[in-house]
Amino acid sequence: MRRLLALAVTGVLLVLAGCTGTAASDRPLVVVTTNILGDVVSHLVGDDVEVLTLMRPGADPHSFEISAAEAARLRSADLLVANGLGLEEGLQQHLDAAASEGVRTFVAGDAVTVLPYTSTDAGGADDPHFWTDPARMIAVVDALTPVLGELGGPAVAEHAAAYRAELEDLDAAMTAAFAAIPAERRALVTNHHVFGYLADRFGFRLIGAVIPGGTTLAAPSASDLADLVAAIDEAGVPTIFAESSSPDRLVRALADEADRRVEVTELFTESLTDASGDAPDYLTMMRVNTERIARGLSP
């Protein structure tokens, strides 16, 4: 009877551990804030390191929240990888708590040459959307590889070399696609200020964004929208780009206010999709965006 009771108790404990996700793992744990960086980290470490990505597919990186269980795992991680530069606004208290408890943190924004927002209403704040320039993502990979190598061993360097080559191919493809767009048509309008690095790298003009400032948590005024409509008409913008992680209702209303036909095209700029979507990983997201931008702005 005692043996049966012991086996029953053991079985219950195993079930509880499985249900709560607290079962022990021999692999080091890397917690990543955004799903874009989560995808990159997963490519670098392979199966030798556990990667927990906090941001769900399709979420807004400025405002997403995490559960108490995820916050606890964040504080017990071997490494925390964050975007930085003020991107993870809704998560900052948890990042600060983890750092204060001694969790080693890698901030991707520290590895790149940072640009300020071009929008004057952002007050000169740093622009966190560096991943729209693949050359800057290469810089992040180069800085992150030795840090991850301490957890995942020599295989990380092999994975990183292969992934770096894919990033270089992406960079070449984007350069060729955007070079084919006439200079006078390289004018970008979106619903949020996200294209500063892409514009700087590939020679685009940023006409404006529906949401003012450097966050998706702000709201445009009537005069903001009127000024943007006038700028769109003056620049002859043929297509406005709406981000998948933000509602495009205002963007479509803006297009309707223009004096000529203006198309609205969806891009995946701040979040990946799930596996069934058009942007399940960073490389695919960038190639899809490149094709849609080139199609939307070409004559």
Image (spheres, grey):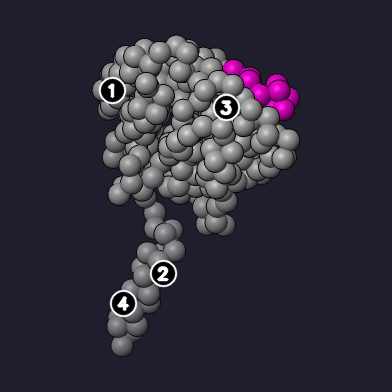
> Is residue 116 placed above or below 57 in the rendered structure?
above
Q: Residue furthest front?
A: 259
Is residue 122 on the magenta stretch? yes
Q: Amino acid at mark 1?
A: Glu
Q: Position of residue 23 (x, y in %)?
A: 39, 58
How far apart marks 2 and 4 lie (CA) works out to: 14 Å
Q: Residue at x 35, y 39 (%)?
A: 279
Mark 1 and mark 3: Cα distance apart in space: 35 Å
Percent across and percent down for residue 65 are 57, 51
Residue 296, quarter of picture: top left
Q: Residue at x 54, y 29 (%)?
A: 189
Task: Note whether residue 121 is visible.
Answer: yes
Q: Nearer the viewer, residue 274 or 5?
A: 274
Q: Are marks 1 and 3 in contact (CB under 8 Å)?
A: no
Instruction: Check disc 4 and give the amino acid type.
Output: Leu
Q: Amino acid at mark 2?
A: Leu
SS category of the residue bearing label 1: helix
Magenta stretch, residue numbers: 115-125
Please tell me which of labels 1 and 2 falls first in the chain. 2
Q: Residue at x 34, y 83 (%)?
A: 5
SS at badge 3 = helix
SS for callout 4: helix
* Quadrant showing the C terminus: top left
Question: Residue 7 shows which numbered tag?
Answer: 4
Few, some or many C-alpha atoms within 10 Å of disc 2 (few <14, some 14-19, many ≥20)? few
**Residue with the mark numbered 1:** 166
In the image, residue 62 above or below residue 196: below
Circle nearer the N terminus (3, 2): 2
Q: Mark 1 vs mark 3: which is more N-terminal?
A: 1
Residue picked out by circle 3: 232
